[in-house]
Structure formats: C-alpha cells, structure tokens
Amino acid sequence: MIVKKNKMISGRLVPGTNLICGLKTVCNENNITNGNILSCIGSLKKAKYIYAVDDEENVIKIRYCDPVSVEGPLELITCQGTIGQENKYITIHLHGMFSDKDAKIYGGHFCDDGNEILATCEYLIVGYEAPVVRRENDSETGFNLLKFN
C-alpha cells in the first residue's frame, strides 16, 4: 500500500476542550479526512476510556467494558490514533496512557466524550490522501473497525 502524504500539522488544544472533539475540529479546519495522530501529550481534568475484557459469547472472545471515568488531575503520557470517515463525518480511533496524582497508570481506548483538557494537549497529526480510511462493520470480529482502501 502506498501512502500519499498530504500534510503534517502540530499545535495544542486549550483548557476545557474535549480531547477527541478538539482533534476532530483541527482535522476539519485543515481538511484532513484520513491520517494518523502520531502524538498527544499534556494533561486532563478527567478521562473516560474503555478496554477489552473476556467474552466467551463473542466471535473473537472479547468485548469492550463499560466506559470507565477517572477524575484528575491526570498526566496525558501518550496517545496515538487513526483518523478516518464514518457516514461522511470524521471519526478518530484514539488509544493512550495517562496517570493520576499518585502516578497510577491507566490505558485504553478513549471515548468520544469525557476527556477534558486541563492545561494543554500538544499534538502532531499527519494527514494523507490515500489510503481512504472508513469505519465499517467487520464480519470476522463483529466490531465496527477502520478499513483502509
């Protein structure tokens, strides 16, 4: 697969911004519909995430837990993800790690809501023309996954 790089942007999200909504806004403002979030670091007032748990009933024997919320202050240690399209809208698949005031580390898939920036979130995003990334149902897993065409 050949990737045609379109642009690379960096910047920061300000206090009070929702992490994923803020990244979607950046993508929309810069006409990025396919790409990768290479890096995000900063702090969160609170975080909401999910992670895989056993599920013998599922085709691949896992499911995602109910959303878990953690109150801050939290250090956003790292996160990265994929930018694609779902029903003509930007979708962001973002995983990361963060720590609480006692340095306990958490990690998983960030939910679309519930992740409020505390002081800053510095990001590096690369957008590309191809491949086109779309969220679609995956018959092998039963999950809506990103497909690269």
Image: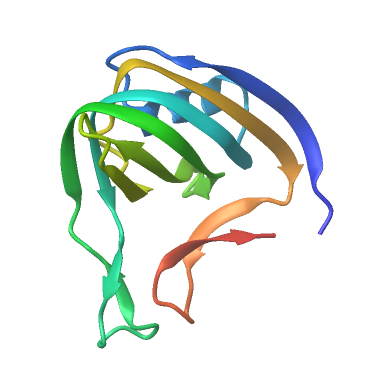
Query: Could you say which is closer to the camera, residue 96 or residue 33?
Result: 96
Q: Where's residue 13, x and y in %?
A: 43, 17
Q: Is residue 29 left or right of residue 17?
A: right
In front here: 116 or 2? 116
Q: Residue at x 27, y 29 (%)?
A: 74
Indicate the position of residue 133 as horizontal and vertical percent values: 61, 52
**Image quadrant occupied by the C terminus:** bottom right
Left or right placement of residue 145 versus residue 61 in this view: right
Q: Where is 103 relative to 121, above or below?
A: below
Residue 68 vertical position relative to residue 128 in the rendered view, above or below:
below
Pick out the residue farthest to the front: 102
| Residue located 42% across and 34% down the image | 77
Residue located 31% across and 12% down the image: 15
* Up-down relation of residue 118 to residue 146 (above or below): above
Asked where in the image residue 64 lies, by quadrant, the reply is: bottom left
Residue at x 23% of width, y 34% of height: 100
